[in-house]
Amino acid sequence: MSSVSTADRILDAALGSFATRGYEATSLDALADGLGVRKQSILYWFPSKEALLEAVIDRSAGELRAALEGSLDRAGNGWARVEAVVRSVFRLAARRPELLGLLRELGRLGPPAATRLVEALDPLVQRASGFLAAEMAAGNMRKHEPRLLLLAIYSTVVGMVTEVEVLRAFGEEPTARSLVRRRSEILALLRSALVVEHETPPERAAQAS
């Protein structure tokens, strides 16, 4: 087995444990036992538990950024871009629930771990802030402070999605239908809070008559 594959296996195991058991409850001894390697093999690649957490954050942030930026690159304009990001997060919840579990755990841990994630995702945050500011200036979205709005959207979406990950941790598998329903609910909530619905000319004419 190649050394790169060993490092990836360690990162995968650590991500799963941090996301479900929590950082403090995860031990290098338990990770080593689960992987069938010696603890020293983990320490060869990651000299401490803190270094392992940092590596997990960096790799997970890269995966999250790639997924969300890919969705934005394929999306249209305006509301379609917000919808694309929400759909992308829900796809991650179904395919990679441990990533969303890690977000929840980092929020609980706070700095410096949470700060490391925020800094890694900052280019995406800057891009999203610029988009929201432009939409507000164009009158397509209600005016708010863009970064505060992003924080509110993040808290709402991730909070709802990580409920799915919590259910899995307790052995209750969410259904595809329940995921679709949650996604529809949050999209409806965000659209009503953000989008300025412009009247079409026939509607204005009808009101004027």
Image (cartoon, helix red, strand yellow):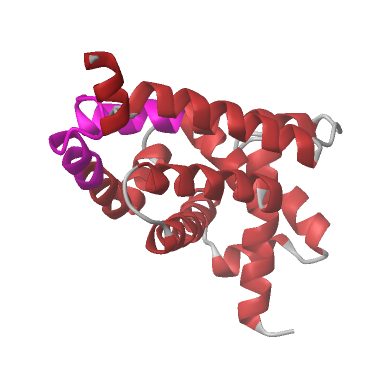
State whether the magenta stretch is mostly helix, strand or loop: helix
Name the image quarter holding residue 159.
top right
- Residue at x 58%, y 42% (from the top left corner): 100
195 and 36: which one is in front? Answer: 195
- Residue at x 66%, y 59% (from the top left corner): 12
The C terminus lies in quadrant? top left
The N terminus lies in quadrant? bottom right
Does residue 30 appear anywhere in the picture?
yes
**Is 208 placed left or right of 37 in the picture?**
left
Most extreme residue toward the left is 137
Residue 83: give x, y in percent of width and height.
Answer: 46, 43
User: Would residue 108 be counted in the magenta stretch?
Assistant: no
Name the image quarter holding residue 58.
bottom left
Vertical side of 149 occupied by 72: above or below: below
Most extreme residue toward the front is 209
- Residue at x 45%, y 61% (from the top left corner): 62
Q: Which residues are magenta?
A: 130-155
Vertical side of 68 occupied by 89: above or below: above
Residue 49: give x, y in percent of width and height.
Answer: 55, 50
Q: How many marks?
A: 0
Most extreme residue toward the bottom is 2
Residue 51: give x, y in percent of width and height.
Answer: 48, 55
User: Would residue 131 be counted in the magenta stretch?
Assistant: yes
Residue 144: give x, y in percent of width and height.
Answer: 21, 24
